[in-house]
Image: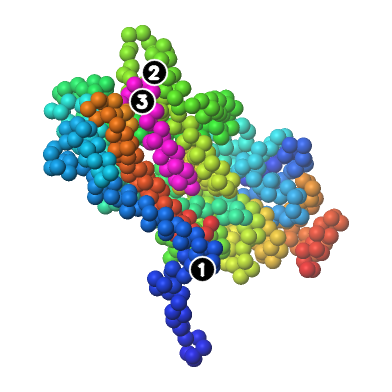
Amino acid sequence: MNDITETRKPPVATTGILGWLRMNLFSNWVNSLISIFVLYILFQFVPWILNWTIFAADFKYNFNGEEIINREMCSRVLDPENGGACWAIIYVRFYQFMYGFYPREEVWRVNLSYIMLAVAVVPLLFDNFPFRKHFLKFTYVFPVIAFFLLNGGLGLESVSTNKWGGLLVTLVLGCTGIALAFPLGIILALGRRSNLPVISMMCTLFIEFIRGVPLITLLFFGMVMLPLFLPEGIDMDGLARVLVAVTLFQSAYMAEVIRGGLQAIPQGQYEAARSIGLSYWQMNLKVVLPQAIRISIPSIVNTSIGLFKDTTLVIIVGLLDLLGIGRGALADTTWLGLAYEVYFFVSLVFFIFTFAMSRYSLYLEKKLKTGINMGAD
Amino acid sequence: MSEDSIISLQNVNKWFGEFHVLKDVDLEVKKKERIVVCGPSGSGKSTMIRCINRLEEHQEGTIIVDGIELTGNLKNIDSVRKEVGMVFQQFNLFPHLSVKENITLAPIWVKKMPKAEAEELAMQQLEIVKIPEQADKYPGQLSGGQQQRVAIARSLAMKPNIMLFDEPTSALDPEMIKEVLDVMIDLAEGGMTMIVVTHEMGFAKTVADRMVFMDEGRIVEEAVPDKFFNNPESDRTKLFLSQILNH
């Protein structure tokens, strides 16, 4: 090995913090100007926001050390100049934000469902989870357990869904909508691509109709019209009716996302699957869908995030989800005028969930890109 | 249809829309016979062999494979596909499955074979195509030649009586063509009935029992290789051969 091929260290000014700054923030004068401007803005606002939300904020007690029980006791009402956010409204109504009007003595059932939800979902999301196979069995039965836990029955006292509210309703709508819409979407996507004209036409009509209508319309449809289609004497629960509407809505979007994935699968894959004797369903389940779904994961997560946020629309048909509880809190005369705090909190909760979803999608994308499975083909 | 023929095409016609791809094609293939089909591109060679396992539907005429007539009857199509293996120009391996899983997929799901038995079978097939050491890799990690050999193993795992090859070496780098052809020669020597669409004339001379030359959707000439290469009847064949042999 001679000197020419020996590796050398890069020039000092291109590495380290200084190098990074120079490369990314101050590479030329336009870039430098923008960087300085952005830094100035951050410098102006970040301390102010931190101060308002944390350092000058009241949590349970105001600056006089009294426990806050109404808006007049908030530091920012007493001293508009120096007071920060008054989180006491969240503190006092935290139970409602999480569970709605679920009876306090039964609330362990909701908490247990939240924990079980995590146990059911996490192994589903990470395929290197230890003992994943066994956990997935639990994932399949979880919806049934959760139904009885939350709703009552099997010896548990029944809790009518009009007592449910807050995060509970948001999660029930979001999770059930996404979980049910996924298989439905797959079936609709396959149906739309079917060679049988009747099936393909029906699926196309369904998808186009649902996608052509705003979710609110579907929610009203679920609330007002669905009972008309049910046999007489059967009364469908309000939440269930909304769930039907949300699931139909989401399945149409899911179908289009998965159809996009299906279109990316080369014809040769179908031909190879057929030539070794696989039936239509075997071909789709074993060869086509695993690849198509992998491709569409980012879009699947994207529409799921959309749905999760759209569940706030149920406020229109009288269900109190997280946002609904928030608006209820604002209407309370004891707490009037604390809109910033309430909306900030509701946004934060939504953000935690949707940000987790979006990170998960990025993680998957990265894994699939670097993963060996899809290789160079 | 003669007594011992395993594939019989009679008066087969096919159109793609208005385009007449196959024109009155007649072909009889006997058991254990090796047929090489050649011809210029667009002459209908691939379409013809794709009709034999119903990847394409013919519109007129009869195709009988191993005593089963190919009609709209889905059951017939399934049983024919179990009899006939096919190897494609683009390999068409399943990229999300390992080499072993590619091969065991059909035995497990179509023949309901237990997993352990299917894996043993897969290893046997990989021995035949000489890459048992690649069993746990994914198709994307293999060279083109290796991928094509896996594709051959995947077809063989269904124990077909007939193998169709649709330009199996056309997508390969020159130095990988030989490894695939060698496997095909072994297969031919083992007594497999084969129809091979290829431009590898050296391969054709070694293994073919009969050459079939197609042009514009018709079979122009059928002859044993010796006669086909040295003394072809039709001018069209002569022209084609002079173009591919003298370049």
In the displayed structure image, the side of residue B158 where residue B182 appears, left or right: right
Q: Mark 3 to mark 2: distance in Å?
A: 12 Å
**What residue sits right under mark 3 in the picture?**
A315
* Nearer the observer, A294 or B29: A294
Q: Which mark is residue A232?
A: none
| A360, B196: nearer the viewer | A360
Q: Is residue A312 above or below residue B127?
A: above
**For the residues marked 2 and 1, what is the alpha-carbon distance in whole angstroms?**
58 Å
Residue, disc 2: A223
Provide the residue span drawn in magenta: A295-320
In the rendering, at what x and y percent does residue A365 appear? Answer: 44, 52
Task: For label 3, count other residues whose C-alpha is less than 10 Å away and answer few (under 14), some (14-19) or many (20+).
Answer: some
- Chain ID for label 2? A
Q: Which residue is mark 1?
A: A27
Q: What scheme was used to colour the molecule?
A: rainbow
The type of residue carrying mark 1 is: Ser
